[in-house]
């Protein structure tokens, strides 16, 4: 089986393919859900700009910068869709090099925001390369695993782990616990979907659990431990480390079923929420749009994840499937950890909510990921005839 | 075994893994939804309350402080809006504090250590505002409020500052307001005082604090996380302004009195002095000057440590009201007590003549008259007019210390007059009991002599002395001096009308007091007070020279000068037979050592201004300095 589907597409095939066919294969739903999520993010940026007392459309506000990044994301998405994803496999090693280079660069010249070196300034913009590194990691891992003859071998698993280890270590050094966990989630999700042996996956999981005490002692910084401890503490100090969480929960809880209305969130507009444009944006959403707003957001995410998985299912090559698995794992993990943090069921780790969190790198990274998925979608069309 | 045409990876989709992934996704999102449902729907009410509590606070609304007017309706103090810089310590991160304090110090021209000390001595909690500086100019206030993010925890508040129209002229009377101290706060909290509040510290500002303060209102205010006021949600109680005071003091008379005192002080080089003017019929204080003084506006603006230290360390104690808060030996002015007592106790009559020799001998001690020649046979008019010491030694001896003390107390000495100014001291009226209690010995006869001429243990405050003469002038009613005439509410309604307050009737027949009034007139008529008699108005009074301190090389003591005089209702033609005077004036010159009595010159100059007498009767040649012992 699989012989015909394994035929490499020739340039002539690709050229012969009609634009119409490509359009039919283009997943409009996927794009729509993603666009709606971006729109939610912009609405949140708008309400947060009002909180700052600024006119939202003025240059420099969260909202106007959000609009700009949305435009850039759209361009990146389009370019990624147009680009033949199969070249990515050829370019996998250079891409890996670029990824490591970016992370090393971040460590060398990164400007500390919140006390860690995560941000790079490019002109007026600050950019978090570790966000881009996530997508590059997915490309590299998908290429590597797709090239393995026996995917379920221990060698493949170990190889994948070895590939992930250097960037993960570099991100840990920033220190950015959240992003390194995302790398781990991507690895786990892709190994799972690659069909890796359950036995070896179980061994791997056991190893990770065994690593926890070592990580706690030697790797985690004090503030990270404090946050984790505060999460585990059933009666946290609401003036100290638990303050952010406490205020976020008040915001969410006081939102009620229908919310206080856009720009009417007293927690948001009163500045009680910590980092409400980024990591705690969901608290603003829940306060101002209520349970209904939260449900709509979750629904959009579920639909989006569904379309991502569909793209992976449809892919006739392992790369496509694995890439979709990586993107889905990344989005799901970030959704659960970010929202879970705001709802008090996950520790505070500083992972952005995909599409919604205000932050250029995260959005561009997501756009690139979905763009590549669309590229995979539209390039499966020939076999469908 | 599958064969591959090339290394093109085969599809690897495994339905079970896809399904598992989808299930995990749904479970995870389902979990989040459940949690969201719990927080927002099940537990939503609790959080709504927390959210409301988070942002609404009850804030006090300061009431405008009452104003103070003089008897002619001149505004003596107003409230002017000013900017104050305040810090909420809870919002000032410890790490940023040195930087913020340094910036504030530079902007406000204050000492960093001073600011730190103010923040640390904050009487309230960390969430209460601490006043760093008041009366900040608009430019600086604007700079600070715009630098909000660089100066966390620093706020600009608009508050009312007291503006004292005449400054030093009335500082001793009006006093000033200042920040609540840490020791005061616990007691004041229940009365609605705030940690960054101001309250009257001395003078009328302190005496009438409860009237002036008004009732603070309260409103519930929505604030943001940094404590900034966003909007007023509801006014719970309107603030009601404080009551205003109409004083008995006339700023014009105060200026006259101060001018007279300042002139003499400059002429002689005096360090301290007091002038008081009263209406003896009502005991309204028309003028009350105590020099040296200070500018209470300095305090209203927030006095610097340096300025404050200078005032506190000044040996002449400008912060002290020498008219009420300090007592001095009364000297010959106290002969009023012995004279009244002698007559009322019938030890002497108005016609009794006593030999006034150059000295009296008591055991081996000689008690000299100030006039070594004596005055010959002298009745009360002669004795009082020439201020014969030996005359009053004898009268005091006849009375004995306890009767002398009784009559001293009848005139109000030995206990506070009750004037509505804070910190009044009581002075001393010596009696056997008193000496036994305080010094553990009975009074010796010589001490009774000394007491008779106001040079014993007796000390009086200027306000007591003028009040005693006011009682003489009004026919024997000892009244309580008052500085505040009436109290008026915010709408102009009189809250407390003026009413003379009687302490007691002096236990002496009207005839005795009439004799003493005429004796006081004789003081002027015999030219004991030089040309005072030439004034186109009639003055009666008594001068006094009171020795104090340590003898100089020639064995002479430094001395204070007193004069207290009164004028009949009809100043030109009136008679001292009638107790109708409505003007009594006292002057006190501390450590005067002048050839003539400087206090008399001060009173004379005051009267010249008060009655608009064109001709100048002052005798500056009497004000030559030197230790002339010339009693009076």
Image: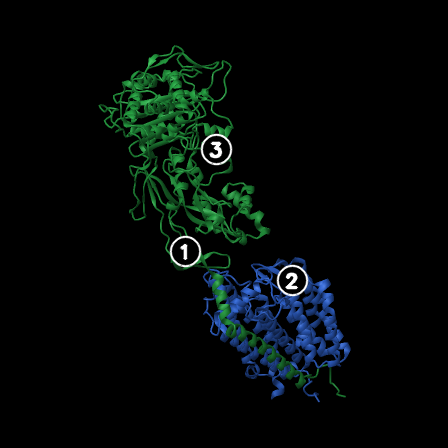
Chain colours: A blue, B green
Q: Chain of mark 1?
A: B
Residue A154, position as x, y percentages in the image: 77, 78
Q: How many marks?
A: 3
Report the side of A9 relative to B89 (left or right): right
**What residue is shown with label 2?**
A226
Q: Residue at x 36, y 37 (%)?
A: B165
Q: Residue at x 39, y 10 (%)?
A: B373
Viewer-side residue, B393 vs A56: B393
**What residue is shown with label 1?**
B218
Disc 1 on helix, strand or loop? strand
In space, the residues marked 2 and 1 are separated at their CA atoms by 40 Å
Same subunit, tags 2 and 1: no
Viewer-side residue, B222 vs B243: B243
Q: Quadrant of the C terminus of chain A?
A: bottom right
Q: Quadrant of the N terminus of chain A?
A: bottom right
Q: Is residue A15 above or below residue B349?
A: below
**What residue is shown with label 3?**
B311
Label 2: few (<14), some or many (≥20) within 10 Å? some
Residue B167, position as x, y percentages in the image: 39, 35
Disc 3 on helix, strand or loop? helix
Report the side of A223 relative to A32 (left or right): right
């Amino acid at each position: 089986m699989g012989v015909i589907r394994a035929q490499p597409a020739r340039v002539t095939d690709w050229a012969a393919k009609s634009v119409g066919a490509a359009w039919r294969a283009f997943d409009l739903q996927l794009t729509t859900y993603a666009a709606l999520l971006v729109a939610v993010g912009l609405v949140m940026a708008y309400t947060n700009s009002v909180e700052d007392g600024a006119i939202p459309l003025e240059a420099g506000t969260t909202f106007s910068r959000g609009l700009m990044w949305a435009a850039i994301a759209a361009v990146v998405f389009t370019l990624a869709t147009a680009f033949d994803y199969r070249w990515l496999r050829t370019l996998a090693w250079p891409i890996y090099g670029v990824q490591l280079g970016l992370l090393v660069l971040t460590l060398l010249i990164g400007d500390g925001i919140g006390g860690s070196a995560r941000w790079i300034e490019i002109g007026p913009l600050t950019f978090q390369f570790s966000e881009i590194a996530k997508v590059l990691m997915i490309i590299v891992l998908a290429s590597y695993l797709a090239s393995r003859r026996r995917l379920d071998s221990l060698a493949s698993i170990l190889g994948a782990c070895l590939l992930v280890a250097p960037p993960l270590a570099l991100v840990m050094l920033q220190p950015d616990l959240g992003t390194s966990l995302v790398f781990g989630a991507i690895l786990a999700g892709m190994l799972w979907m690659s069909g890796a042996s359950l036995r070896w996956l179980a061994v791997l999981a056991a190893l990770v659990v065994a690593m926890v005490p070592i990580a706690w002692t030697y790797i985690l910084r004090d503030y990270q431990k404090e946050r984790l401890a505060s999460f585990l503490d059933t009666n946290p100090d609401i003036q100290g480390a638990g303050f952010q969480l406490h205020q976020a929960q008040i915001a969410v809880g006081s939102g009620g079923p229908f919310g206080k209305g856009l720009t009417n969130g007293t927690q948001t507009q009163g500045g009680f929420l910590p980092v409400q444009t980024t990591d705690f944006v969901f608290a603003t959403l829940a306060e101002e749009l209520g349970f209904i707003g939260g449900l709509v957001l979750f629904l959009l995410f579920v639909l989006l994840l569904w379309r991502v998985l569909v793209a992976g299912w449809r892919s006739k090559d392992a790369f496509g499937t694995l890439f979709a698995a990586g993107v889905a794992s990344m989005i799901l993990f970030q959704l659960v950890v970010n929202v879970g943090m705001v709802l008090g069921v996950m520790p505070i780790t500083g992972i952005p909510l995909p599409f919604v969190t205000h932050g250029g790198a995260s959005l561009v990274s997501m756009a690139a990921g979905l763009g590549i998925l669309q590229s995979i979608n539209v390039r499966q069309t020939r076999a469908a005839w | 075994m599958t064969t591959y045409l090339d290394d093109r990876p085969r599809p690897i989709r495994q339905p079970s893994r896809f399904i598992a992934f989808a299930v995990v996704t749904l479970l995870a999102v389902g979990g989040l939804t459940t949690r969201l449902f719990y927080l927002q729907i099940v537990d939503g009410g609790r959080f709504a309350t927390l959210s409301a509590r988070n942002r609404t606070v009850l804030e006090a609304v300061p009431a405008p402080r009452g104003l103070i007017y003089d008897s002619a309706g001149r505004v003596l103090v107003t409230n002017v809006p000013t900017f104050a810089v305040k810090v909420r310590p809870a919002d000032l991160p410890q790490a940023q504090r040195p930087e913020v304090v340094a910036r504030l110090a530079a902007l406000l021209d204050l000492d960093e250590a001073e600011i730190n000390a103010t923040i640390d001595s904050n009487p309230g909690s960390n969430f209460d505002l601490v006043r760093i500086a008041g009366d900040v100019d608009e430019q600086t206030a604007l700079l600070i409020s715009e630098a909000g993010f660089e100066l966390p925890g620093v706020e600009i508040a608009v508050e009312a500052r007291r503006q004292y129209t005449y400054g030093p002229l009335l500082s001793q009377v009006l006093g000033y307001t200042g920040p609540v101290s840490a020791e005061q706060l616990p007691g004041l909290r229940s009365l609605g005082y705030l940690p960054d509040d101001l309250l009257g510290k001395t003078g009328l500002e302190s005496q009438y604090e409860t009237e002036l303060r008004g009732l603070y209102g309260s409103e519930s205010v929505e604030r943001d996380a940094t404590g900034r006021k966003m909007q007023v949600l509801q006014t719970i109680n309107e603030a009601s302004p404080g009551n205003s005071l109409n004083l008995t003091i006339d700023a014009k008379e105060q200026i006259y009195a101060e001018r007279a005192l300042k002139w003499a002080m400059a002429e002689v080089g005096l360090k301290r002095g007091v002038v008081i003017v009263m209406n003896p019929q009502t005991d309204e204080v028309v003028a009350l000057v105590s020099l040296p003084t200070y500018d209470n506006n300095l305090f209203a603006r927030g006095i610097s440590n340096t300025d404050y230290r200078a005032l506190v360390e000044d040996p002449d104690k400008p912060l002290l009201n020498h008219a009420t808060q300090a007592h001095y030996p009364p000297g010959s002015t106290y002969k009023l007590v012995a004279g009244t007592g002698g007559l009322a106790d019938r030890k002497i009559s108005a016609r009794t003549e006593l030999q006034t020799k150059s000295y009296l001998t008591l055991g081996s001690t000689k008690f000299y008259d100030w006039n070594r020649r004596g005055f010959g046979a002298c009745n009360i008019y002669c004795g009082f007019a020439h201020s014969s010491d030996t005359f009053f030694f004898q009268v005091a001896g006849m009375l004995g210390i306890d009767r002398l003390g009784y009559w001293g107390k009848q005139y109000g000495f030995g206990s506070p007059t009750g004037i509505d100014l804070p910190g009044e001291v009581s002075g001393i009226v010596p009696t056997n009991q008193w000496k036994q209690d305080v010094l553990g010995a009975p009074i010796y006869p010589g001490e009774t002599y000394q007491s008779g001429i106001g040079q014993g243990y007796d000390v009086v405050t200027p306000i007591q002395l003028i009040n005693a003469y006011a009682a003489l002038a009004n026919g024997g009613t000892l009244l309580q001096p008052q500085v505040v005439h009436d109290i008026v509410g915010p709408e102009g309604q009189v809250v407390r009308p003026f009413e003379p307050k009687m302490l007691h009737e002096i236990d002496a027949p009207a005839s005795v007091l009439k004799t003493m009034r005429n004796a006081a007139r004789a003081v002027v008529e015999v030219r004991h007070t030089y040309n005072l008699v030439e004034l186109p108005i009639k003055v009666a009074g008594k001068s006094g020279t009171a020795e104090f301190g340590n003898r100089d090389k020639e064995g002479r003591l430094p001395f204070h000068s007193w004069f207290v005089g009164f004028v009949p209702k009809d100043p030109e033609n009136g008679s001292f037979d009638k107790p109708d005077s409505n003007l009594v004036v006292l002057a006190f010159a501390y450590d005067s050592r002048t050839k003539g009595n400087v206090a008399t010159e001060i009173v004379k100059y005051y009267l010249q201004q008060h009655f608009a007498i064109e001709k100048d009767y002052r005798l500056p040649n009497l004000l030559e300095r030197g230790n002339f012992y010339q009693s009076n």
